[in-house]
Amino acid sequence: MKYLFILFLFILNSLYTFEKNNSPLISSSHFHSSSINNEKITVFYDSNILFIKGLNEFGNVYVYSIIGNPLYGFKNKYLKNFSTPINLKPNNLYIVRIELKDGIKTFKILSN
């Protein structure tokens, strides 16, 4: 069973590594950091609020369930210290997709 779970995570990670500047997407913490064009991006969810830090431009933010169902979409938002209240079921994994003019970045977050 343990090996099936690891295989599932590996396959899931492979499905979401198509964007520019790939980095490992599975993180053991509640947030994930990455960089695009030398900007460090931090995405995390805490107390029913989604936070995105490290961007200084406009972009689109989408939140999906782990199986790809769209849950929330925020278009043409200024992403400097972006935060917005959203309701996610506790202890579940979600995908956050950030579309910028220079590329697309995806993150996995764990709701608390």
Image: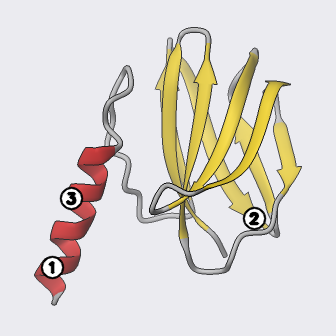
In the rendered structure, are the residues bearing label 3 and label 1 in contact, judged by CB atoms less than 8 Å apart? no
Across and down, in percent, residue 10 comes to: 21, 58
Q: Is residue 76 above or below residue 46?
A: above
Q: Quadrant of residue 79?
A: top right
Give the secondary structure at mark 2.
Answer: strand
The tag earlier along the polypeptide, 3 or 1, is 1
Residue at 33% over, 35% down = 23
Q: Amino acid at mark 1?
A: Leu
Q: Residue furthest left?
A: 3
Provide the residue designation for mark 2.
Answer: 46
The tag earlier along the polypeptide, 2 or 3, is 3
Give the secondary structure at mark 3.
Answer: helix
Quarter of the rendering occupied by the N terminus? bottom left
Across and down, in percent, residue 78 comes to: 84, 23
Q: Answer left or right for 6 relative to 75.
A: left
Residue 78 visible? The answer is no
In the rendered structure, are the residues bearing label 2 and label 1 in contact, judged by CB atoms less than 8 Å apart? no
Provide the residue designation for mark 1.
Answer: 4
Q: Quadrant of residue 87?
A: bottom right
The tag earlier along the polypeptide, 2 or 1, is 1
Q: Residues within 10 Å of mark 3 (few under 14, many from 20)?
A: few
Q: Residues within 10 Å of mark 1 (few under 14, many from 20)?
A: few
> Which label belongs to residue 10?
3
Q: Amino acid at mark 2?
A: Asp
Q: Which mark's residue is nearer the viewer, 2 or 1?
A: 1
Give the secondary structure at mark 1.
Answer: helix
Q: Residues within 10 Å of mark 2 (few under 14, many from 20)?
A: some
Across and down, in percent, residue 21 comes to: 36, 22
Q: CA–CA distance between discs 2 and 3?
A: 26 Å
Residue at 66% over, 80% down = 90
Q: Is residue 86 above or below residue 104?
A: below
Residue at 82% over, 67% down = 48
